[in-house]
Image (spheres, helix red, strand yellow):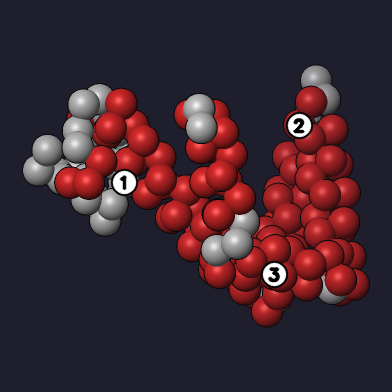
Amino acid sequence: MDIIAQARELAKEIQKDERYLALQLAQQQNDEDKELGAAIGKFNLVRMNLNAEMSKSEKDKARIDQLNAEMRTLYTEIMKNPHMLAFSAAKDEVDKLANQITNILMMAINGEDPDEIDVSAAGCGGNCSSCSGCGQ
């Protein structure tokens, strides 16, 4: 099996992982939540209005401040939604998994022994110039 085929097999295994499945379920619950969808729609409309206001040559500071405040309120409302909280937590777990996989690949490409790579090294991007100290 060539390396690209192996990468595809890894991708299939990721899609079977409980973290990935939890993210898919959370996304579906977000999509089915009418209140959340309405709040996101309202947020996007306010953001478009803010962008339009910001692009005017003569900016209305009071209007910009009002739209910013409205956006912050809507954002807080969206992020407090139970479905969005579950989605954010599930996404964090999948992102952590993806970072661990990426770290293994990048460090192996840089000559490290894949079996010796510490996947718990937080924040490692495979480039030691931004290292927080994994000891490598």
Task: Give whichever of 74, 111 is nearer the camera.
Answer: 111
Residue 16, percent from left and from top: 60, 62
Residue type at mark 2 is: Met
Q: Quadrant of residue 85?
A: bottom right
Q: Residue at x 86, y 71 (%)?
A: 32
Task: From this view, report whether residue 116 is shown above or below residue 56.
Answer: below
Mark pair 2, 3: CA separation:
34 Å
Q: Which residue is mark 3?
A: 26
Q: Nearer the viewer, mark 2 or mark 1?
A: 1
Taking the image as shown, residue 10 lies to the left or right of residue 80, namely: left
Q: Residue at x 43, y 55 (%)?
A: 96
| Mark 1 element type | loop
Task: From this view, report whether residue 94 is shown above or below residue 90.
Answer: above
Q: Is residue 76 visible?
A: no
| Mark 2 element type | helix
Q: Which residue is mark 1?
A: 123
Taking the image as shown, residue 30 lies to the left or right of residue 4, namely: right
Residue 11, percent from left and from top: 57, 46
Answer with mark 2 or mark 1, whichever residue precedes in sequence. Answer: 2
Mark pair 2, 1: CA separation:
35 Å
Q: Is residue 126 visible?
A: yes
Q: Quadrant of residue 106?
A: top left
Q: Residue at x 50, y 27 (%)?
A: 2
- State the mark number for residue 31: none
Taking the image as shown, residue 87 lies to the left or right of residue 105, namely: right
Residue type at mark 1 is: Gly
Residue 121, percent from left and from top: 24, 50
Q: Which residue is mark 2?
A: 54
Are the residues flagged by discs 3 and 1 in contact, CB closer than 8 Å? no
Q: Residues within 10 Å of mark 1 (few under 14, many from 20)?
A: some
Task: Give whichever of 83, 66 is nearer the camera.
Answer: 83
Q: Residues within 10 Å of mark 3 (few under 14, many from 20)?
A: many
